[in-house]
Amino acid sequence: IEKQVEGSSFRVMIVNGRAVGVCLRKPPYVIGDGQCSIKELAALKNKDRRSGRISTLHPIKIDRWLLKHQGLGLNFIPPKGQVVILNHKVNLGSGAEIVDLTKIAHPKIVKLCVRVAEILDAEVLGLDVLADDISRAPSRKNRVWIIEANSLPFIDMHHFPHEGKAQNVAAAIWDLVLN
């Protein structure tokens, strides 16, 4: 049995001993306008995603069990400003949104991730991290959990974030290969 840990989901990309990208992976959601149903809001958001403006934005996959667990249904009209989480999965295929936070990641969290890459003898590693706040040092009030290490990480999320500055992870990998 695994322990359930809480926190926001981040990806820390380590290449050749340094963090070259840190991003928040937000679960798929809609924000109520007081007029449209959850189903309509998701359809509108998916229509915008199909416009191709950002290549990493995939259609939202609604988890009906999650809605039911929240006491909601597809035809529920959320009040204006209410955020409704549509899926707990934070992978791109489920419709997660990516926010680049490379510049604000706390140095102690970055150092921890670099150390994990060293221990695993990995020159390229994508670490999935759970934390309340990536900009604060690890502490009893801001626990940091590394929950997965990916030796062949997906890097598009760093090149095409929904919010924030793109990070050229591919260039860092090529520099490693060529040097």
Image: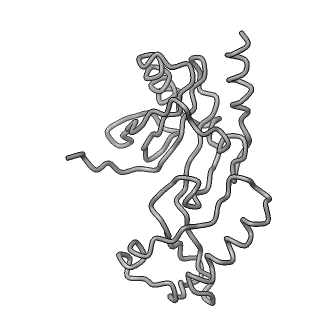
Where is residue 111? Give x, y as percent. Answer: 49, 23
Quadrant assignment, res 61: bottom right
| Identity of the residue drawn at 47% across and 27% down | 113
Question: Quarter of the image holding residue 77?
Answer: bottom right
Reply above or below: 13 against 27. Answer: above
Q: Classify residue 54 as left or right of residue 140.
A: right
Q: How many marks?
A: 0
Residue lying at 71% horizontally and 9% vertically, measured from the top left: 179
| Closer to us: 100 or 92 | 92
Q: Where does residue 141 sit, x and y in percent of width and height?
A: 35, 43
Along the viewing direction, whichever of 83 and 116 lies nearer the viewer? 116
Residue at the image position 73 percent from the left and 32 percent from the top: 168
Taking the image as shown, residue 114 lies to the left or right of residue 174, namely: left
- Colour scheme: one colour
- Where residue 164 appears, as percent x and y from the top left, is 71, 47
Q: Position of residue 13 (x, y in %)?
A: 57, 32
